[in-house]
Amino acid sequence: MIARADCDCFSNLAEASGDRALRFALAGNPNCGKTTLFNALTGLRAHTANYPGTTIECRLGRCSNGASDIELLDLPGIYDFSASSEEEQVALNALQGRSAEFGAPDGVIVVADATNLNRSLFLISQIVEMKLPVVVVLNMVDLAETGGTRVDACKLAAELGCPVVPVVARNGRGLPELRAALREMKTPATRNVCGGCDGCRFRARYSWSDAVTKRCVEHAPQPAGRWTERMDHALTHPVWGVAAFFAVMLGLFFLIFSLASVPMDLIDGLFTELGGWVERVMPDGDLRDLLVKGVIGGGGGVLVFLPQICILFFCISLLEDTGYLARAAFVMDRLMSRVGLPGKAFVPMLSAHACAIPAIMATRVIEDKRDRLVTILVLPLFSCSARIPVYSMLAALLFADSAWRASLVFTGAYATGMLAAVGVAFLLKRTLLKGDSRPLVLELPSYKAPSVRTASLVMLDRARVFLRRAGTIILFISVALWALATYPKSEPPPEAVALQQQAEQHRARGATKEADATQAQVERITAHSALANSAAGRLGRFIEPALRPLGFDWQIGIGIISSFAAREVIVSTLAVVYGVGEDVAEESPESLYDSLRRARRADGTPVFTTATCVSLLLFYVLAMQCLATQAITRRETNSWKWPALQLGYMTLLAYGAALAAFQLLHACGIS
C-alpha cells in the first residue's frame, strides 16, 4: 500500500532548480495519450498515434503552468521498469536520470488510461517510489464514462498521495486544472509496494494495483454483444479484415485524386501564369530561362502535388485516432508472420509510407537483431510520400479523366511495394538471415472519435517538411539541372540553319504563315540539339543504351540519375528537361502534363506511352533512389555491407520488373 505523506511544494522545486526552467518527464503506458497531451500543453506538432512504437525518441517542449514556464519531456511508452526494447530503455534512462542529454527530471507527469486503470497503476507504483514530485493525469475519462466506467479521482489521489487530474487531452478538457496541479507538484512519501515477496517479484505490486482499482473504480454492467465487439470481429477477421484494409486504402486514394484536383489545378495554373508573366516582362536571355524553366518550372512541377500529400496525411491521422490502424496491424501480422517478418515490423512499415528514414529508426522496437535487419532492408520498398508526385504524374498521364482509375494506379503501386517487401523478406529469412520471428503482442485501443485538430497539425507538419524540401533540395537540383541542360552551348545544327534560310525566304515573299511555321520548327530543332549536346544530354545519352529496353529515352535517364538525391526530383527534372526542348516561341509555357504528353522521340513517336508509363511506375515503386535512406541504413546497421545489399537488390528488382512490363506490353501491342 502507498501511504499519503507530507509533500514539497512547487516553490521549493523552483528554488532548487535555480535559473533554469523546471523539467518534467511525461511518462505512461503505450496508447494512453501522452503525445496528445504533450501537443495540447506545448502547442508543438509532435506526431500522435495510438499503437506502440511511434514515439521512439524523447521530445522536449515548453509550456506554462500559469505561474512560470516549464519544460516537458515526452518519453516513449513503457509498461514497467523492466525494459525489453530500446525505446523502453530510452524512457527508463530519462526517468532515472541516466540520460546524458536531458539529465534528471525535476518531476514526473504520469498519464494513466482511465479505461484501464489497473494496467497503468503498475507503472505508477514504480514511479512514485522514485521520491520525485508526481502528478497523475487520468486521460480519456470521456471514453471510460461512455463505457460505463467511473474513476473516483479524489479516492485515487488519497491512495497515491499526489494530485490526480481527470482530462480529455484531445479536446482540452481538464487542462486548466492540470496546469494548476503542476504549480503544486508533490513528492509522495511512500513505502515499497513490492517489499519482501516470495515467488513472483511482481505479485505484491499486482495485488496492490487490483486493490486500488476495486476501491476507486466503479463499473456499470455492460450489455452483451456491444457494437465494439462486433466491429472488432469484422475488422480483425482473417478474410474480411484484409478486405476492409484494402477497401480503406482504395477509398483513401480516391479521395486524394477527387478532392485534390481543384487545388492542384489552381497551383498548376498559378505557376503557368507566373512563368508566362516572367517571359513577357523580362528580356530574352539565360536569366529569364533560368527563372522560367529552372525555378518556376522545376519548383512548380513538384509543388502542384502538395494538396495530395496534405489529404493523405490528414486522412491517415484520422484513421490512427479512431483506433482502426491498430486493428489493421493485428490483421496484417497474420500475413507477415507467414513470411518470417516480426509482428512489430508493422509499425515501422506503416511509418515507411511517410518516409523510410524515421521508419528505419523505428525498427529499434524489434528486439531480435535478425528480424530488425530484415525489416530495415525491406522498408524502402514501401511507398513513401516522396513517391506520391511520381505516382500522381504517371497516373494523370495514364488516366487523366478518371479519378477511380487513377486511384487504382495508386493502390496498385502501394500493393506492389508491399508484396515486393514481403517476398524479399521471405527470401532473406530463408537464406542470409535465418531464424524464427517473435509474435506481435499488441493492445487494441478503444474506438474513439478522431481529433480534427490533431489531424490538421499532422497535415501541416508534413506540408512544412515537403515545402522545406521543395524550397531547398528540389529547388537547388532544379537550378543545377537547368544549368546542366543549358551549358555548354552549341551551334544550331545544319538542318536548323537551312530551315532558318527558308523561313527568311517565306517572310521576304510575304508568306507569314509559312514563315512562322518554319521558324517554330527551327527553334524546336535548335533547342533539342542544344539539350542533346549539353552536359545533361551527354550524360543521358551515355546511359541510354541500358535504359532503352525499359522504354526510357536519355531525357528520362537524366531524371533517374537526378532523383537519387530525392525521388520526387524526377518530376521537376522532367519539367526542366522537356521544358527546355519545347517550342520556345510559345507566348506562355504549358502545364507539366501537357509538356510530357507532347514530348516526342527522334522518330516522332510519343515518349510517354502506356507501356513506358507502366515501366517507369514499376521502376519507381521498387528502386532505392534515396541517398538519405542509404545513409540512415548505414548508421543503424553500423556497416556499409547492408546498404550496398539494399541498393543492389532494389536496383535489380526495379530494372527487372520495368523491363518485363515494358517488353510484355510492347509485345501485346499496347503502346
Image (cartoon, rainbow, N blue to C red):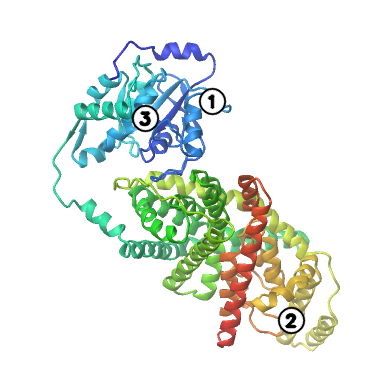
Q: Nearer the viewer, mark 3 or mark 2?
A: 3
Q: Position of residue 12 (x, y in %)?
A: 44, 11
Q: Residue at x 49, y 44 (%)?
A: 367
The three-letter amino acid code for the residue at tag 3 is Leu
Q: Is residue 531 left or right of residue 354?
A: right
Who is closer to the viewer here, 337 or 32?
A: 337
Q: Nearer the viewer, mark 1 or mark 2?
A: 1
- Disc 1, SS: loop
Residue bearing the label numbered 2? 521
Between the C-alphas of marks 1 and 2, the distance is 72 Å
Between the C-alphas of marks 1 and 3, the distance is 18 Å
Q: Dividing the image into 4 quarters, which one contains the N terminus?
A: top left
- Disc 2, SS: helix
- Residue 620, image quadrant: bottom right
Between the C-alphas of marks 3 and 2, the distance is 76 Å
On the question of residue 104 being in view, the answer is yes
Residue bearing the label numbered 1? 98
Who is closer to the viewer here, 64 or 149?
A: 149
Q: Is residue 224 left or right of residue 121?
A: left
Is 545 situated above or below 266? below
